[in-house]
Amino acid sequence: MTDDTLENAVFRNLNEVGEALYYLNALVGMSKAKKENNILFLRLASDALKNDMMSHLMRVLDKTKSTGSFWYIYKRKKGAITEIIKEHQIDFSLLERLADKHHINHIRNKSHFHIDRNYAYSPFKVMQLIV
């Protein structure tokens, strides 16, 4: 892989995280308005923002081999990223756990992007499995 590929992967992943944060900030603001008046539009918009936020995070944390996700970048620049993790005292195990196939990918594959027949009527069961 070329340095351009790595640079493009970094750029795309930062954009995905930025979008997820944008949606999170909008959700926080909407939650206040939602408490004051229970308008259907706000509920639909809130659900859409949550969906998009999760979609962006799922793309960044995807561990499949053919993606240019964070894990591709981590593999290519492990030393530099490890230094940043140490410098900022980041609990990297939480990120690894979240990206584990039994966590965020499980939600993605069983409920978020696909309708698994075992969870079709109870998508919240998927969430209970990973907690």
Image (cartoon, rainbow, N blue to C red):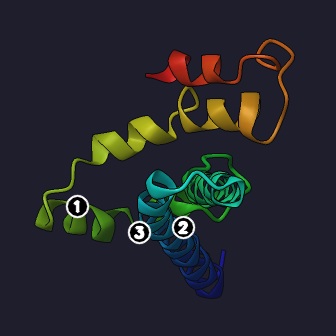
Q: Mark 1 points at which residue?
A: 85
Residue 96 in the image: state x and y as whole percent: 40, 41
On-image quarter of the N terminus: bottom right
Circle 2 SS class: helix
Q: Quick one: 90 or 79, which is closer to the camera?
A: 90
Q: Comparing marks 2 and 3, which lies closer to the viewer?
A: 2
Query: Which of pointers 1 and 3 lies earlier in the amino acid sequence?
Result: 3
Query: Which of pointers 1 and 2 lies earlier in the amino acid sequence?
Result: 2
Seen in the picture, residue 85 relative to 99 is either above or below; the reply is below
Residue 95 in the image: state x and y as whole percent: 38, 46
Q: Which amino acid does label 1 sit on?
A: Ile
Circle 3 SS class: loop
Q: Name the residue under label 3.
A: 77
In the displayed structure, does residue 126 sit left or right of residue 85?
right
3D distance between C-alphas at marks 2 and 3: 28 Å
Q: Mark 2 points at which residue?
A: 23
Please tell me the numbered disc located at residue 121.
none
- Label 1 crowding class (10 Å Cα cut-off): few <14, some 14-19, many 20+? few
The quarter of the displayed image where residue 60 is located: bottom right
3D distance between C-alphas at marks 1 and 3: 12 Å
